[in-house]
Each structure stands twice: as structure tokens, then as C-alpha cells.
């Protein structure tokens, strides 16, 4: 399998994911995946496409991720892995699509408006 780059995005996080046949080692930004994501929910989120397709431990995953927060980065990596798995075996699409793992989450942070402290919060109203 030649090296292909698969991109995953979530909020402001962008992940480039490389999959190689191997022992199942996951590396994120040249760090061990457990060290980079100390929160278990984020690690489970990344492993979800591998568990659903029963390929956990069959591929080495190298991911470079930047921007956003930890949860956004984890979900960006998850999308990149799901796209890579579908490229390897198109049959995995039937497993991953119903779970929503091939869909980029379009939700973004709403912009702050002038005359308000945040996007929707308003300054205290005084009638008199």
C-alpha cells in the first residue's frame, strides 16, 4: 500500500492521517497517542472506526494535527482514519456511514457580535 494522506477536519482542527499495515501503533504529532490524548473519551473516539471495522491492531497510524482543541483534534483524526479505511476496503463504507463517521461535522463557533459580550449573550438591560 503506497502512502496516501487522508485529511480530517473538525471545528478549527485539521488532521493529516497516514495508515500503514503494522502492529496497531498510533502516533500523533510524533508522540504516543496515550500521551497526546490523556482523556479516555478522545482515545475511544479515535479508535471507534477501527473497532467497528474490526481492524484494531492491523494498521499503524501516523497523524499530524494542528489547530482547535483536544476534542476537535481527536474527531478530526477519527474522520481521517475512517476515510483511509474506506479507501483500503470500500466494503467498510456500509459499516462506517450509518455511524456518521464519514461525515464532516459542519458545526463551527458562532462569531461575536458588536454591542454584545459574546455571540448571543447580551449586556444587562436597564429600563431606567
Image (cartoon, helix red, strand yellow):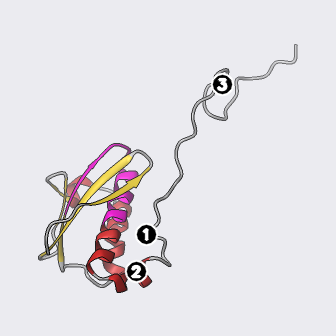
- Cβ–Cβ under 8 Å for marks 1 and 2: yes
Q: x%, y% of residue 12?
A: 41, 44
**Which residue is the site of mark 1?**
102
116 w.r.t. 22: above or below? above
Q: Residue at x 45, y 48 (%)?
A: 11
Which circle, 3 or 2, is nearer the viewer?
2
| Image-based side of 52 in relation to 31, left or right | right
Q: Could you tell me residue 80's position as x and y percent? A: 32, 63
Name which residue lies at 30% across and 54% down. Answer: 15
Judging from the image, what secondary structure is the residue with disc 2 in? helix
Q: Position of residue 71 (x, y in %)?
A: 39, 53
The residue that appears at 36% across and 60% down in the rendered structure is: 42
Q: Which mark is residue 116?
A: 3
Name the N-terminal-most of marks 1 and 3: 1
Q: CA distance from mark 3 to mark 2?
A: 44 Å
Quadrant in which the C terminus is drawn = top right
Q: Alpha-carbon distance for marks 1 and 3?
A: 36 Å
In the image shown, does 2 or 19 lie closer to the viewer? 2
Badge 3: residue crowd in 10 Å (few <14, some 14–19, many ≥20): few
Task: Please give the label number shown on residue 64.
Answer: none
The residue labelled by disc 2 is: 93
Q: Residues within 10 Å of mark 1 (few under 14, many from 20)?
A: some
Question: Label 3's element?
Answer: loop
Foreground pick, 45 / 80: 80
Q: Can residue 90 be found in the magenta stretch?
A: no
Q: Residues within 10 Å of mark 2 (few under 14, many from 20)?
A: some
Disc 1 is placed on an element classified as: loop
Foreground residue, 23 or 40? 23
* Lower sequence index among marks 3 and 2: 2
Write the start and end of the magenta stretch as one range: 62-80
**Whether residue 40 can be seen here:** no
Q: In the rendered structure, which disc, 1 or 2, sits on the residue that comes first in sequence? A: 2
Amino acid at each position: 500500500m503506497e502512502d496516501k494522506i487522508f485529511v480530517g477536519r473538525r471545528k478549527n482542527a485539521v488532521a493529516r492521517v497516514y495508515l500503514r499495515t503494522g502492529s496497531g501503533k498510533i502516533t500523533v504529532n510524533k508522540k504516543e497517542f496515550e500521551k497526546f490524548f490523556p482523556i479516555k473519551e478522545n482515545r475511544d473516539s479515535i479508535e471507534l472506526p477501527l473497532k467497528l471495522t474490526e481492524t484494531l491492531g492491523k494498521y499503524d497510524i501516523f497523524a499530524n494535527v494542528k489547530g482547535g482543541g483536544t476534542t476537535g483534534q481527536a474527531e478530526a483524526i477519527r474522520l481521517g482514519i475512517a476515510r483511509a479505511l474506506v479507501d483500503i476496503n470500500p466494503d467498510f463504507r456500509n459499516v462506517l456511514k450509518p455511524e456518521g463517521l464519514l461525515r464532516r461535522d459542519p458545526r463551527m463557533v458562532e462569531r461575536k457580535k458588536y454591542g454584545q459580550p459574546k455571540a448571543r449573550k447580551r449586556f444587562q438591560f436597564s429600563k431606567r
